[in-house]
Image (cartoon, grey):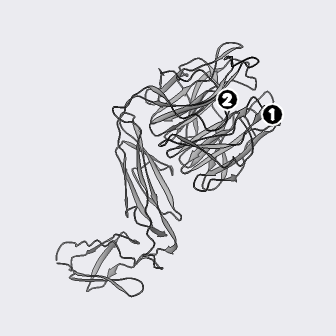
């Protein structure tokens, strides 16, 4: 034969040093388009009320298709809280999970990286500004303490993530009375270490909003110091992960405010609700909601939150939807002697219509179990830019997981519409992959790829011709025989 011949074999296990023919696991691939045609847009829809007690100044974040809310302040008992709840987007059901590992607190920060969630800093029942960080593992429903933030303990700070890095900055601290910190810190998930980055570009503040879009982080609004009885802020700043530089962007479109919520969907950022400052010492809860376009640096007012004005609520996004829940209103009379209302509702926001269908593929197939040491290649398509949860920004990448690992990618198209796709590789820790030597004798030359492999692979001759093919596993057992014509 003069052309390369390819043979595909799905059961050969020559690359394993232990037999695992009876242990076959299935990887999971799912696609979450951020924008769906024909759905209602710029609308709010009520979802199941938050599963726990009504509260405010709580923490919220999302992991995959699940949302999480925990900690916070309960006014009737004048106490911080430590319970932690999971919301399932598919079933619209709340489930209580393991209590937050760091103890009761409020005014903390939260973010997620890959399949893990994080809560840190905040204020406890005493007068302690906290500086700890805790990791939540949904699969184990457990908390593990990580390294403390490098700066001072703080309350009312901002937290978000970019790739496999977490960020915490601003806030207020009793360690610096009258002069709250403007420092900004990066946490590396892989090494569990903190590194100080460029100080926040604006003035000191607490109760600000933070979120990320791609490799950029954003902080805006807030009250300028420890007292909430002051003029609010409406400035908005961008931090570039690549250059470690802050750039001021267009001021927030609404009135100055603090204790708002913010999240991103694709290339758009959203800020809404909060304690709005209309004049010095004049503030009211609000229900307005605004969209920021990263490409044009412009703000557009969207539909108001249907559930009512509030501040100190929780906001996050899952796929192509945004969510706001719980919170507090100073101005609603709820009964004799009660002039304040805590919410326990939860609302879903559908943004304007986009259409993007991300796709992800791999070699070898994700339904194949990987051995420790075996590499795989992942490729995404459907957009013009890509951001993996590892921080990579290319359309494809090589991975070499040592444990079962999920990889997700955010795909953005030319219109700024965004979708996500994810893939999980199952790693068998009872086997190791070392590959085999290529056949390069004078009588026979052949290539095997991918190498190492534990599932489907290809054999190609180098022009000398392969006619009889016998394949043996590491135990000397013939597992395949055929003639190639």
For mark 2, give the secondary structure: loop
Q: Image quadrant of residue 41? A: top left
Q: Quadrant of the C terminus?
A: bottom left
Q: Residue at x 81, y 36 (%)?
A: 175
Q: Image quadrant of residue 56? A: top right
Q: Quadrant of the N terminus?
A: bottom left
Question: Eyeballing the image, is 483 above or below 280?
Answer: below
Residue on which the image places disc 1: 174
Q: How many marks?
A: 2
Rendering coords of residue 328 (x, y %): 66, 25
> Can see residue 448?
yes
For mark 1, give the secondary structure: loop
Label 2 packing within 10 angstroms: few (<14), some (14-19), many (20+): many
Question: Eyeballing the image, is 236 above or below 431?
Answer: above
The circle on residue 207 is: 2
Farthest residue toward the front?
A: 336
Rendering coords of residue 201 (x, y %): 63, 31
Give the spatial CA distance, label 1 vs label 2: 15 Å
> Can see residue 196?
no
In terms of depth relative to the viewer, which is nearer, 257 or 97? 97
In terms of depth relative to the viewer, which is nearer, 150 or 105? 105
Label 1 packing within 10 angstroms: few (<14), some (14-19), many (20+): some
Question: Is disc 1 in contact with disc 2, using a CB cutoff of under 8 Å?
Answer: no
Q: Residue at x 43, y 69 (%)?
A: 24
Q: In this rendering, which labeled residue sits more in front, label 1 or label 2? A: 2
Rendering coords of residue 413 (x, y %): 36, 38
Farthest residue toward the right?
A: 126
Question: Eyeballing the image, is 29 above or below 103?
Answer: below
Q: Is residue 430 left or right of residue 409?
A: right
Q: Residue at x 62, y 53 (%)?
A: 141
* Among the two numbered marks 1 and 2 on one chain, the one whose residue lies closer to the N terminus: 1
């Amino acid at each position: 034969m003069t052309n390369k011949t390819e043979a595909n074999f799905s059961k050969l296990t020559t690359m394993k040093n232990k037999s695992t023919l009876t242990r076959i696991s299935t990887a999971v691939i799912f696609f979450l388009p951020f924008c769906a045609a024909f759905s209602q847009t710029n609308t709010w829809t009520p979802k199941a009320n938050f599963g726990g007690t009504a509260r405010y100044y709580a923490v919220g974040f999302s992991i995959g298709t699940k949302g999480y809310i925990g900690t916070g302040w309960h006014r009737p008992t004048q106490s911080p809280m430590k319970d932690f709840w999971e919301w399932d987007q598919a079933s619209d059901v709340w489930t209580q999970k393991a209590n937050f590992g760091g103890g009761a607190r409020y005014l903390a920060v939260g973010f997620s990286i890959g399949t893990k969630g994080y809560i840190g800093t905040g204020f406890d029942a005493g007068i302690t500004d906290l500086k700890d960080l805790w990791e939540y593992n949904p699969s184990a429903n457990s908390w593990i303490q990580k390294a403390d933030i490098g700066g001072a303990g703080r309350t009312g700070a901002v937290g978000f993530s970019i790739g496999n890095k977490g960020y915490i900055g601003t806030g207020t601290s009793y360690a610096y009375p009258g002069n709250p910190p403007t420092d900004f810190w990066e946490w590396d998930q892989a090494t569990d270490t903190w590194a100080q980055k460029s100080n926040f570009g604006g003035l000191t503040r607490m109760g600000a909003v933070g979120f990320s879009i791609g490799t950029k982080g954003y902080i805006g609004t807030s009250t300028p110091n420890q007292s909430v009885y002051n003029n609010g802020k409406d400035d908005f700043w961008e931090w570039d992960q690549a250059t470690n530089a802050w750039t001021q962007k267009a001021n927030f479109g609404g009135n100055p405010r603090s204790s708002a919520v913010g999240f991103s969907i694709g290339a758009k950022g959203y800020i809404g609700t909060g304690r709005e400052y209309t004049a010095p010492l004049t503030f009211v809860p609000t229900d307005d909601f605004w969209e920021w376009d990263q490409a044009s640096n412009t703000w557009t007012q969207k539909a108001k939150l249907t559930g009512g004005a509030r501040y100190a609520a929780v906001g996050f996004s899952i796929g192509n939807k945004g969510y706001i829940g719980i919170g507090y209103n100073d101005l609603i009379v709820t009964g004799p002697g009660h002039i304040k209302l805590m919410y326990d509702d939860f609302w879903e926001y559908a943004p304007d219509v986009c259409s993007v269908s991300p796709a992800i593929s791999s070699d070898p197939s994700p339904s194949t179990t990987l051995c420790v040491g075996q590499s795989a290649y992942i490729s995404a398509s459907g957009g013009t830019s890509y951001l993996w949860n590892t921080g990579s920004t290319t359309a494809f990448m090589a991975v070499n997981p040592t444990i079962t690992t999920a990889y997700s990618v955010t795909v953005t198209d030319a219109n700024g519409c965004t979708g996500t796709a994810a893939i999980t590789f199952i790693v068998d820790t009872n086997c190791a992959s070392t590959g085999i030597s290529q056949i390069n004798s004078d009588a026979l030359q052949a290539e095997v790829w991918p190498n190492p492999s534990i599932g489907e692979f290809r054999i190609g001759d180098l022009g000398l011709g392969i006619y009889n093919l016998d394949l043996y596993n590491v135990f000397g057992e013939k597992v395949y025989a055929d003639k190639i014509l």
